[in-house]
Image (cartoon, rainbow, N blue to C red):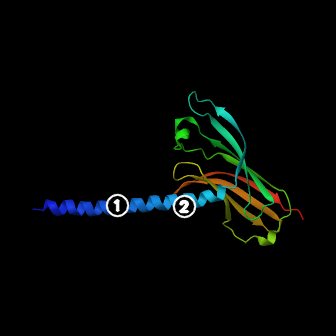
Amino acid sequence: MKNKGNSYLMNDVKMNKFLRKCILALSLGFLSFSTLRTLAEDSREIGKVSYDFNAFTPNDKIVAETFEDPDFKNVSCYISRSVLGGVEGTLGVAENTASASISCTQVGPVDLSQIKKSESGEKVFSERRSLLLKHLNVDRFADFEKGVLIYMLYTRKLTTGSPQSSISAVKIKD
């Protein structure tokens, strides 16, 4: 016959390990959120339009915002994305859609020799799209042969992503 006292003790030990893992996971999630959010701090809202009426809470909107490439201040990108209103949007728990678009332009001189060659790109923008796990990202690539910077917009959850994406190519002028 098992000793019930030891059984409860073992369950407490397992529960404590589980709780420690949960706290660690949440801490890492919030740390990564604060790190990624800094990439979007230089963004600025240009305008917005309502596309779905909500009677007692904010409407669903399409928002246009801009940010500068952190490495090339003379490249500005413009993003159009949906922002859900309603009760969930007001409370900050709505999961916004993966639909978004991007357009970038050169607004001054750019020196392409500063960019590192990378097939996986370099993250230049990231913004939270749900309470914990979904982000809208913009990665930069370079086509050195043609003298073009490419900006790819996509959304990603912790374990999965969406194939919906948008791309903008900026021909660097001398």
Furthest residue toward right: 174
Is 85 positioned to the left or the right of 125 in the image? left
Q: In the displayed image of the protein, which residue is found farthest to the top? A: 55
Q: Quadrant of residue 117?
A: bottom right
Q: Residues within 10 Å of mark 1 (few under 14, many from 20)?
A: few
Q: Is disc 1 in contact with disc 2, using a CB cutoff of under 8 Å?
A: no
Identified by mark 1, the residue type is Phe
List x then y, in percent, for residue 100.
Answer: 67, 47
Q: Is residue 3 above or below residue 79?
A: below
Say what amino acid the circle numbered 2 marks.
Answer: Ser
In this rendered view, identify the residue nearer to me: 27 or 21.
27
- Image quadrant for the N terminus? bottom left
Q: Earlier in the sequence, mark 1 or mark 2?
A: 1
x 51%, y 58%: residue: 30
Q: Is residue 144 above or below residue 74?
A: below
The residue that disc 1 covers is 18
Which residue appears at 60% of the width and 34% of the height?
A: 58
> Percent from the top left, x then y, of residue 35?
58, 61
Eyeballing the image, is 3 above or below 131? Answer: below
Measured as percent of width and height from the top left, residue 43 is found at: 70, 52
- Tell me the tag on residue 89: none
Distance from label 1 to label 2 (Cα)? 21 Å
Which residue position holds label 2?
32
**Residue for point 65% across, 59% down:** 39
Could you tell me which residue is drawn at 81 percent across and 58 percent down? Answer: 170
Number of other residues with Cα within 10 Å of mark 2, as a class: few under 14, some 14 to 19, many 20 or more: few
Total number of numbered discs in the rendering:
2
Image height check: is 142 above or below 82? below
